[in-house]
Amino acid sequence: MPPNTTVSPTSRFPTTHVPTASQSTCIDGLITSPITTCPATFDCLQNCDFGNVDTSRFNIDLSLELSSIIDSKSAYMSARAKWMEVVTGDLEPRLSSSVSSSGRGNCTNPLPTLIDDMLICGQDVAIDGVGQVLGNAGPILVRSNRTTGKRTTLIGRMRFDSADVANMVQNGSIRRVILHEMGHVIGVGTLWGINRLLDAGNNYLENTKASNVWKNDWGCVATPPVEKDGGNGTALGHWDEGCLGDELMTGVADRDMPFSRLTIASVEDLGYTVNYTAADDFDGSNTPCCNGNGVSFLSTHELSDGGRDAAILYGQNVLSESQLSDDLRLLVEDDDNGLTYVGDQMVVVLYEEEGHIFEVFVKKNDG
């Protein structure tokens, strides 16, 4: 991609843009961030085309602050490539100068001048030592489409416990975990509510792209099964594992996880343009609840009540720390740009117990 990229004349933004990425050598798709305060034992990195505006495709900019002694970089780049294969349509860029610092997450790397189409801040941070909480992920700032009203992620975060990343790299789970978490940043599960894709009974809506795949492609009855276990504030962020087993966006992340047409359809329901040929081989007609008989897979791994409580407590702390005052929220939420701050509304927590990785969707505690 050329260093100066022309923006569509219909855009409200400048017609040329010089990327903010450093001019250091591009290695495996990444370059060193221009930040001068990167911790001594960390690598601060960006994708090589960071900050470029390309109206012909969907783009994810990665701003990474990762431990230099553990190589998780390739997992981020692999997940980025896959999601950019799944999502294909360009979204209107947003000037980062219009985004208050409070709406940018915790990344210290500089933002691109224009965010096109999404910025994800990935960090290794200290959380609770080896095991238990592995990290968290979710959208921070979402944009509204001026025509459809659909809300898609502009800025999101992915944070992993630096004490656990080495184990995830060693046991091979890091790639599928980051692929899954990036899906939550994009909005699968996390933005179902704000986009009104669930009915009053928290069932996925009829007359949606995902329901079309479920019923017409796979021949199943009712609507796609949403996870409802876990109680108030933790369910509704994944497909039901008891039905869909190891599909990518179910709530257990410690085995092979095929990327199904159902998840791609749900991404389209969120307002993205998608590519169904990017799906893996997954036949939903063979799932036990396809015919509405109430049968589920016999799950051999369930998160204990104590583990769930610990994950919820951690998630609520993350949301509390992300809470904005009314004054700051007014600065972050820009009516002209259609921005909404959701960093204090929901977060997905990864929790390890007895060698298995579970996910808990934590929403703001209204009580």
Image: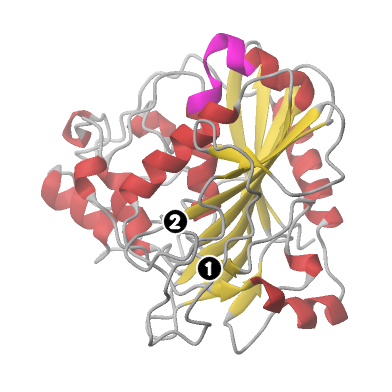
Single out the mark in the foreground, 2 or 1: 2
- Quadrant of the drawing holding the N terminus: bottom left
The residue to which callout 2 is attached is: 59
Q: Residue at x 76, y 57 (%)?
A: 365
Residue 47 part of the magenta-drawn span: no
For the stretch drawn in magenta, the main secondary structure is helix
Helix, strand or loop at label 2? It is loop
Question: Given the image, on which type of amino acid does mark 2 rest?
Answer: Asn
| Mark 1, residue position | 194
Q: Quadrant of residue 197?
A: bottom left
Vertically, is 120 above or below 57? above
Q: Amino acid at mark 1?
A: Ile
198 with respect to 61 (left or right): left
Asked whether 25 or 367 is in front, the reply is 25
Question: Which segment did they paint magenta?
Answer: 168-175
Q: Nearer the viewer, residue 275 or 301?
A: 275
